[in-house]
């Protein structure tokens, strides 16, 4: 089945130690998104790629970076995780950016910062 | 600008009872509306979406939602709750472009 895959499902890191989360998709979608979701809150969009074009949300901290080396993969890099960055990180994809396009979500990576 | 408001952060229903989860939207342009379900420690799964075709939209797992422009609402319903429906439900609105605006979610508890 075509799908969105996130690895690892659970990630533990230390305060200030860089961490990378991975997302891959077999849907061949043009758009890939990264969301941060804290407990009992709505997902918050960090940034997205339309193909190779990177779009950062205005309030996304500089501590968060992303890479999309090819259509299938997208990475979220947290350069110096703080305790406040502990959250579920969701990757999503959509075929296009027309507003009506469904976003398909991966299972998420739960990040713990010690 | 687009936004959604989900009334009721927690809803409890008895098994077999009607499920009604409320969503009101604000949009300066004709909106596209979505309902997603999230089970614990899982990603979001699409239940249904409205894209300006029929105002009554049927989704998976017996859920449906009706788009009411006059009320700016897109409430989610299911005639008979099942234990497996217990989850977090998110309403989202989008217009042109990639941005989804999610509501703060409604946690559904089903009482046996």
Image (spheres, rainbow, N blue to C red):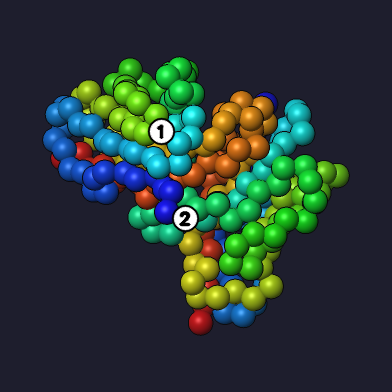
Question: In the shown orientation, is residue A100 left or right of residue B43?
Answer: right
Residue at 54% from the left image edge and 45% from the top image edge? B104
Quadrant of the image occupied by residue A12: top left
- What's the residue at 29%, 46% (across, down)? A110
Horizontal arrangement in the rendering, residue B43 relative to residue B2 (left or right): left
Is residue B53 at all visible to an observer of this figure?
Answer: yes
The chain letter for the residue carrying disc 2 is B
Residue at which label 1 appears: A34
x then y, percent, for residue A49? 45, 24
Residue A58 percent location from the top left of the image: 47, 18
Which numbered circle lies on residue B38? 2
Question: Does residue B97 appear to the left or right of A16 in the view shown?
Answer: right
Which residue is found at the position 37% from the left and 34% from the top?
Answer: A72
A36 or B47: nearer the viewer: B47
Q: Quadrant of the N terminus of chain A?
A: bottom left
User: Circle 1: is it few (<14), some (14-19), or many (20+) Cα within 10 Å?
Assistant: many
**SS class, disc 1:** strand
Residue B75 shows which numbered tag? Answer: none
**Position of the C terminus of chain A by quadrant:** top left
């Amino acid at each position: 089945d075509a799908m969105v895959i996130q690895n690892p499902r659970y990630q533990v890191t230390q305060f200030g130690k860089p961490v990378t989360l991975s997302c891959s998709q077999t849907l061949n979608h043009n758009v890939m998104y990264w969301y941060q979701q804290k407990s009992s809150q709505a997902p918050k969009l960090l940034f997205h790629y339309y193909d190779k074009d990177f779009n950062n949300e205005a309030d996304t901290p500089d501590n968060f970076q992303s890479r999309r080396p090819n259509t299938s993969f997208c990475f979220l890099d947290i350069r110096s995780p703080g305790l406040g960055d502990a959250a579920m990180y969701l990757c999503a994809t959509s075929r296009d950016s027309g507003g009506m396009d469904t976003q398909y979500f991966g299972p998420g990576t739960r990040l713990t910062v010690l | 600008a687009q936004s959604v408001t989900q009334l009721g952060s927690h809803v409890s229903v008895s098994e077999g009872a009607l499920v009604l989860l409320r969503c009101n939207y604000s949009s300066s342009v004709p909106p596209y509306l979505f309902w997603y379900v999230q089970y614990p420690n899982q990603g979001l799964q699409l239940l249904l979406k409205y894209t300006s075709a029929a105002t009554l939209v049927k989704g998976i797992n017996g859920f449906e939602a009706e788009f009411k422009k006059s009320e700016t609402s897109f409430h989610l319903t299911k005639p008979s709750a099942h234990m497996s429906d217990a989850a977090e439900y998110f309403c989202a609105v989008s217009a042109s472009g990639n941005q989804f605006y999610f509501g703060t979610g409604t946690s559904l508890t089903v009482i046996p």
